[in-house]
Amino acid sequence: MKRARFSGLLILVLFFLFGCQLSGQATPTATGGDASPTARPTAVPGVFSSPENGISLRYPRGWTLQDGEDEQNLAVFLSPDRTLYVYLYTFPAYDDSLEEAAKRIAQEAFTGLKDITYLTDEKITLEDGREAWQTLVTASTEDGRELKIHLLTLVHGARQFLLMSFGSPKSYDYYASDLMSMVATLHAEMPALYDIPREQALVLPGTESTNPRDYDPATTHSSGDKLVFSGLVAFDPQLNLVPDLAESWDVSPDGTVYTFHLRQNARFHDGRPVTAQDVVYSWERAADPATQSDTVLTYLGDIVGVKEKHAGQADHIAGLKVLDEHTLQVTIDAPKPYFLLKLTYPTAFVVDRANVESGSEWYRQPNGTGPYKLVRWERFKVMVYQANEDFYLGAPVIPYIVIQLYSGIPIRLYEAGEVDIASVYSYDIERVSDPSEPLHADLRSGVDLCTSYVVFDVSQPPFDDVKVRQAFAMAVDRQKYIDVVFSGVGLPAKGLYPPALPGYNPNLEGLPYDPQRARQLLAESKYKGPQGLPPIIYTDSGIGNESGSTAAALAQMWEQNLGVTITIENLDPNQFYDLLYQGQHGQIFVQGWCADYPDPENFIDVLFHSGAQQNLGHYSNPELDAILDAARVERDVSRRIELYQQAETMLVQDAPAIFLRHSISYVLVRPHVQGYTLTPIDISFGRYLWLDWSKP
């Protein structure tokens, strides 16, 4: 969640107030010729309105309105002589009271100032009857310049608004009546949906990445944009494998040749028919070393020739053959029961060559094949999807899906009526689980097919020693970890497989929490105890030096139970997984893995086989590999499950990872959203839903 960014803002603006240039400030400048200033004062009182943020106000005659500096700064108002500045901000509301919110904002806004004297700090009522909090102070900068600053904090639904005014005391007093007229007219209401009728839209909260690779099906590490793109097969809400772009397929008697028959009516969003050659292009592009896909070997590597293409040893994938425009023959290297399941992953989605080659930001205007078209994307604000009326499986019932980006805490957005479906964070689960809570009736919950775990890089000391790995594993109290980090929500993991996954073994003992035995194992290792260990670096996803809650909790347990000091180093969250795959990490990092398809191969083989692309800890165990190789081609279901359970037991004892937690999802769904099923695997849900506004 993006937090307000006020720290030091006033100090920066002061440079402009006293005649210095403020970098990035769009201010009027004296120009010659026919050039115009960047903003003009209004000759009459003006109205600023931001319908998508649900906020408006009136500003006085002679004042100048300028665009805000970023997605949180909505507008800047300048007095006629440009000596008083008024900034309007919006950012997510938290669970504190109006007064608490105002005081938190003031603390952040006044960073870097001194001699702060409070003149007013009180609740007021605006013209529309809403309550707000105003704070008026005098302060000075480090070089002694005096300021008068007014903050007005308004909380409305899931959003907070700040009207921040500042200037010299003389300037502030001169324009005080103008300022108070602006303050009084600040008006908040339900945000508009970008000219989309509310009854035609499913509205969801969301975030976005600044990493383009996250939006390319060939390179994403997430579940992909299944509204826009699609593949040959998919899962339905009951997790049945169903035809998608392929209406049917045939399998050779030996299980190695698949012949897919594409739908005659399948088209890209621009109307061009989807052909077998489009599938070949998409898969060969994913396997091209220039694409740098970290997932292609995992999901398409069973196809003959993919490994060679990825290694730069072949121009084409030998196992792909176009029989005609709508028929594709695929040859795999051995009979593998899970092969079709892998084709549900985004790496196997079909993309349009002309679209991909149109420019580096092609993904912002994707020409997909899925049930929805991406028709609007404003960075950090909104993504709007419109139903694809020509979708080959029939047009979706819901005309629009709107993703509100960074607009607030999901449960607050839900309570404010701004979104239709919202995940519940761990600290709110106790509340919504109470039958007396009004939101309880809308609650859905279920165990995910997910496991979070600590990865040891076994190629780096000290985790090249199995006893060190076992010691670290037995020094972690999983239940305490869940209680501290996730407010008690989740199941302690004894092994890799989550409950409900085929192959899950409820009798698996795992490595128990036993600090005494952990210390003994560390002493028995070749490092002879904590004093013999090299420096240990834990790589985390974060900004600056602040430790994440998981990293802090684990590091504390290892220090308390083993006497080991852990150094935590952060990587940019938007580049975290790319950097991990490039090997830019310490000896320890934490990952979470959720099933792409309900098969144990998608966990233990994908993550811990020595040849696996996702094996970031460089773990290698020939005995384990042999079991996994046998399970890959085993057609007897019972025997196959037995092999995967045997492999999991071996993995737990060898401890290349510490399995921490299986997550549980809690989701709020409005009654008017019909057809919703909480699935443990992400599916293309949009086309299965409809809206019934007659529901209360």
Image (cartoon, grey):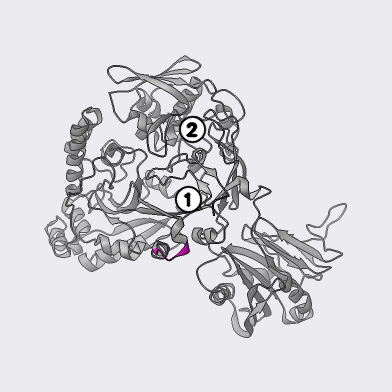
Indicate the secondary structure of the residue bearing disc 1.
Answer: helix
> Residue 10 or 90: which is nearer the viewer?
90
Q: Position of residue 401 (x, y in %)?
A: 57, 45
Task: Judge from the rendering whether residue 327 lies leftward or rightward of residue 305; answer left or right.
Answer: right
Residue wearing tag 1: 574
Residue wearing tag 2: 230
- Magenta residues: mostly which secondary structure? loop
Quarter of the rendering containing residue 430: bottom left
Q: Residues within 10 Å of mark 1 (few under 14, many from 20)?
A: some
Residue at left offset 24%, top offset 58%: 534
Queried whether the magenta region covers residue 437, the answer comes back as yes
> Residue 638 or 669: which is nearer the viewer?
669
Q: Is residue 424 visible?
A: no
Which residue type does callout 2 highlight? Ser
Q: What range is drawn magenta here?
A: 434-438
Viewer-side label of 2, 1:
2
Quadrant of the image containing the C terminus: bottom right
User: N-terminal of the two: label 2 or label 1?
Assistant: 2
